[in-house]
Amino acid sequence: MNIRMVDTITQYQKIKDEIDLELNKVFESGAYINGPIVKQFRNNLSQFLNGAHVVACANGTDALQVALMAAGVQPGDEVITTPFTFVATVEVVALLGAKPVFVDVDPQTFNIDPEKIEAAITPKTKAIVPVHLFGQCSDMESILSIAQKHGICVIEDAAQSIGAEFTFSDGRVEQSGTMGDMGTTSFYPSKNLGAFGDAGAIFSNNDELADKAQVICNHGSEVKYYHQSIGVNSRLDSMQAAVLDVKLRYLKEYNQARNEAADLYDSLLSDCDDVFVPYRAPYSTHVFHQYTLRIKAGRKARDLVQAKLNEMGVPSMIYYPVSLHLQGAYEEYGYQPGDFPVSEKLTEEVLSLPMHTELDESQQTFIINSLKQALTFSKTEKV
Ligand SMILES: *Cc1c(COP(=O)(O)O)cnc(C)c1O
């Protein structure tokens, strides 16, 4: 059985005609950068996001950096975020000369723990960047109310959560990435809405912030060759926009397929006491960018399980093996082991199983049977 962690190839083959047609239009048009398809995709995505502005850019890391720049983050400022995320979230804060201030995560959701945010706020705090990890929204209602109280900007890192919906206590339902002052996403090929290369976007319901982000992405220029601010070069090219515009038509279907795969994993694991399956928060839908288990027995067992799975032809990944406050690159901020115990514990327990839109029942049954065997093996191996 050929099991892939991510299967973008089969996904492409199913909509090949539509994608090839749109790509050929771009090839023939000569408008390789900023062609009409970029605008069309932005409009269609904006509609998907209930009208939020969409600024398209080169990748999800740029999207975060540009959003922080639009929010006015300056050297010396502090930005609160989670240590249990992909490095990009923290990297851009450091690149702007600001200090990443970590707040530990919730052990069930893997997302920033709102109850620990206020203790981390200082007069220098400029922004909070919650990451909707693995496809489920952070507790945005709590985060937004803390941010409002302290006059702090909220930038959602929605790189893994496009299409997830958050329900507020008054019944309002909002799209992930559109609740804070700004949101950012990535269209990296393996993301839920994946391009055939690098691509990203910034979302905002605030006209002024969306304008600023747009200008920053374009070398700080509104009128060609006139620059009122220092910007960057971050563009979405027409070919990526063409692919994304087709795939956007299927995003709901894709997220539904991921949910069905997650439900099946859950039920196949219902008799397994050695793992925690992903928690589903009552306030958010999940789009299962990853299906991430916690192996209760911890690092040694987890690593053995992964090695055994690999032998049996089942790929798996550890997102993420090192909490960011303990990465060499961020040593200067002086964080120590033990500072964020939940995040540290998760790095020892997490294991992400294959998750994509093309999984079938026989593959999933094979994956879970292999996992159960690997778990049994890890127990005998320990003594
Ligand atoms: C993928 C990802 C990014 C970065 O996106 P790129 O397009 O690879 O630059 C940022 N944050 C998170 C949480 C991600 O998963």
Image (cartoon, rainbow, N blue to C red):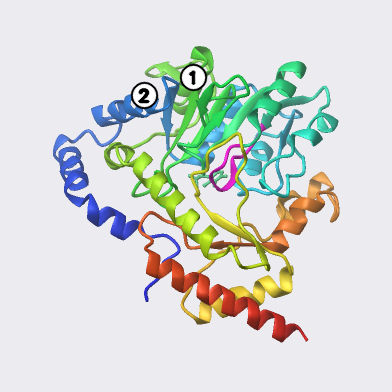
Segment tinted magenta in the rendering: 129-137
- Closer to the camera, 366 or 98? 366
Q: Amino acid at mark 1?
A: Ala
Asked if 43 appears above or below 350 in the picture, the reply is above
Of the image marks 2 and 1, the number of the one nearer the N terminus? 2
Q: Alpha-carbon neighbours of circle 1 within 10 Å: few (<14), some, or many (≥20)?
A: many
- Give SS at disc 1: helix
Q: Amino acid at mark 2?
A: Gln
Compared across the picture, whether 238 is left or right of 377 comes to left
Specify the quadrant of the image occupied by residue 13. bottom left
Most extreme residue toward the left is 28
Q: At which x and y percent is residue 69?
A: 59, 26
Query: Viewer-nearest of labels 2 and 1?
Result: 2
Query: Residue drawn 52% across and 76% down?
Result: 370
Residue 66 seen by the camera: no
- Give SS at disc 2: helix
Query: Residue drawn 29% across and 59% down?
Result: 10
Q: At which x and y percent is residue 377?
A: 64, 83
- Name the residue beneath numbered marker 1: 210
Asked if 351 appears above or below 310 in the picture, the reply is above
Compared across the picture, whether 79 is left or right of 137 comes to right
Residue 382 seen by the camera: yes
- Name the residue beneath numbered marker 2: 47
Q: Is residue 373 magenta?
A: no
Split into 4 quadrants, where in the image is the C terminus? bottom right
Query: Residue drawn 46% across and 77% down?
Result: 313
Q: At which x and y percent is residue 265?
A: 51, 61
Q: Alpha-carbon neighbours of circle 2 within 10 Å: few (<14), some, or many (≥20)?
A: few
Asked if 330 appears above or below 30 in the picture, the reply is below
Query: Residue drawn 59% across and 32% down?
Result: 156
